Image (tube, rainbow, N blue to C red):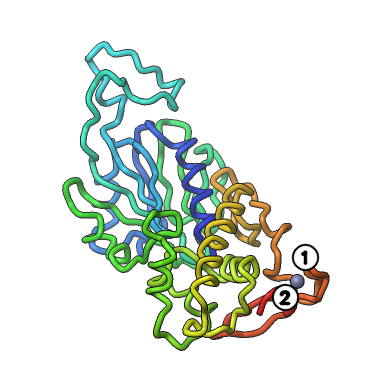
Amino acid sequence: MPELPEVETVRQGLNQLTLNLEITGGDVLLERTIAYPFSVGEFINGIKGSAIATWHRRGKYLLAELCQSPFLGSRGSGEDITPSSPSSPPSSSSPPSPPTGYLGVHLRMTGQLLWVHRDEPLHKHTRVRLFFGDQQELRFVDQRTFGQMWWVPPNVAVESIITGLAKLAVDPFSVEFTVKYLAMKLQNRRRPIKTALLDQSVVAGLGNIYADEALFKSGILPETLCTDLQLKQIERLRTAIIQVLEASIEAGGTTFSNFLNVKGINGNYGGVAWVYNRAGEPCRVCSNLIQRTKLAGRSSHFCPQCQS
Ligand SMILES: [Zn+2]
């Protein structure tokens, strides 16, 4: 499942490739990928004719801020915006126009966004195609079909359409993710810290891989009860969460069997994991063998020497 670093890697790729190109249309191959409340027709009509000003990430949601197409704005005005330089921003002399809505995407289990040429043969799990200009398209490929897309009309609160956003906890990269916040979220709950870290109402976007990695980096055993954690450990844990996520983003996301960035390339964090998926292999710090245990149905990997 894509975790925060993978989604962030996708966001950065989309910001390099898809901005300021007119969305000329689209094709929805699996209707239920387009989330309530809009129909497929309303979704396509809603985004058609806009361009993407920028991609944001909230937890594991991707949000494209739509703007008036720069080509639309230039028509008849004599302003020279050449289609051959799509990455150049719209004229800076004109004030930025308000968003013409938002396009939301959640990859869920197996969703992938791929930036491809229109002639590229269709993958059998292609669910949605969004056409940009005459040549390019953004393809949503999703084997397990849990992935979703939303259209948010202009002047409508994003959370009123993408309701999952309202329930999201603080993002680990936001200024609100403080030691005090984390301690407050963990106190009074007699459950293993590993289980708490997977709870999206504690911290947004953390999954099995980075929870294991962060617990190793902070020297805490996964089954440690939240109520038994010292403030110093929580402090180390907060720092470790940010560090492992940053390291993975730097490396382009984890290598999943099915994770690809928008150019269709695998990330490479898997090769340097401390403990994740390394049961039976020597710890990179102390050479003891990494162990695996099950917590709340999920595999947890840890070093019995480095973590206590
Ligand atoms: Zn060790």
Residue 271, given in percent of the width and then of the height, sits at 73, 57
* Residue beneath the point at 47% across and 53% down: 140
Point out residue 227 in the picture as x, y percentages from the top left corner.
47, 84
Circle 1 sits in a helix, a strand or a loop, which is it? loop
Q: Residue at x 28, y 13 (%)?
A: 79
Cβ–Cβ under 8 Å for marks 1 and 2: yes
- The quadrant of the rendered image in which ligand 1 is seen is bottom right
Q: Is residue 193 above or below residue 150?
A: below
Residue at image point 45% right, 39% down: 15
Packing grade of label 2 (10 A; few <14, some 14-19, many >=20) is: many
Q: Residue furthest top?
A: 78
User: Which residue reaches farthest bottom?
Assistant: 190
* Residue 202 in the image: above or below residue 66: below
Q: Earlier in the sequence, mark 1 or mark 2?
A: 1
- What's under tag 1, amino acid-wise? Val
Q: Is the CB of mark 2 within 8 Å of ligand 1?
A: yes
Report whether 195 appears left or right of 88. right
Q: Is mark 1 within 8 Å of ligand 1?
A: yes
Q: Between 219 and 253, which is closer to the camera in this rendering?
A: 219
Local secondary structure at mark 2: loop
Residue 238: image location, x then y, percent:
51, 64
> Going 50% across and 58% down the picture, which residue do you hit?
4
Instruction: Name which residue type carries label 2.
Output: Cys
Quarter of the picture containing the C terminus is bottom right
Q: Is residue 203 left or right of residue 248?
A: left
Q: Is residue 128 visible?
A: yes
Label number found at residue 303? 2
107 relative to 164 in the view: left or right: right
| Residue at mark 1 | 285
**9 relative to 216, above or below:** above
